[in-house]
Image (cartoon, rainbow, N blue to C red):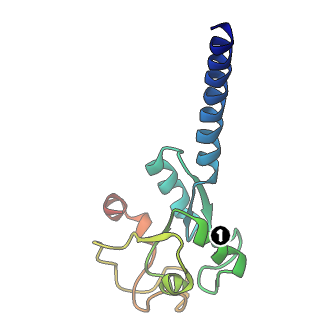
Amino acid sequence: MLNILRYSFFAFVALLFIGCSNSEENKKSEVIYVTISPLKALVEELTCGDFAVEVLVPKGASPETFEPTARQIAALNDAEFCFKVGLLDFEHNLNNLLDRGATTVDLSEGIKPLSGSCAHGHHHGHTHGVDPHIWTSPRELGVM
């Protein structure tokens, strides 16, 4: 009887440690991508820190000329979601690049974009005639 209690105790402790380590390990392995850095804070807030949030377009790079690398595409295939503005040219091709990976979420759905180009004078890299900076509008941010 004593041996059964001893084994039960050790089994209980082992399961307790396995359960704790798995939940922490799973949390770290669940990654959500965003296409550009302004979306990172939004997604982190929405997910309450339950996921790691990574940005596709690296700091200092231009979303207007960006193309994801093979490594990023592979990482997207392991990710849970990829949140995109939906108005940038490179974002239109993301679904074609993914085999089985992240579900893409178009944050421009339900938003009527402002016509005109972006304020800094670029006329390429996003849907022409539309300002892609939808996260700067409080009303549109609420829709997102």
As drawn, 60 above or below 25: below
Residue 127, above or below 82: below
Name the residue nearer the viewer: 10 or 78: 10
Is residue 60 rendered to the left or right of residue 103? right
User: Residue 101 appears at what percent x and percent y?
Assistant: 54, 72
Residue shown at 43% from the left, 65% from the top: 135
Residue matched to label 1 = 75
Residue placed most toward the observer, 132 or 14: 14
Secondary element at image label 1: helix
Q: Residues within 10 Å of mark 1 (few under 14, many from 20)?
A: some
**Would residue 31 appear left or right of 43 to someone viewing this image?**
right
Q: Residue at x 65, y 34 (%)?
A: 18
Q: Quadrant of the N terminus?
A: top right
Looking at this rendering, what residue extends furthest in the front direction?
1
Q: Pick the quarter of the image with the C terminus.
A: bottom left
Of residues 33 and 30, the one nearer the viewer is 30
Residue 108 image-quadrant placement: bottom left
Q: Is residue 140 above or below residue 11?
A: below
Where residue 11 appears, as percent x and y from the top left, is: 64, 24
Q: On screen, 86 above or below 43?
A: below
Q: Nearer the viewer, residue 38 or 30?
A: 30
Residue in the picture at 67% in, 19% down: 7
The amino acid sitting under disc 1 is Ala
Q: Position of residue 86 (x, y in %)?
A: 43, 78
Q: Position of residue 104 (x, y in %)?
A: 46, 72
Q: Give me the residue at 43% from left, 64% from top.
A: 136
Q: Is residue 69 left or right of residue 96?
A: right
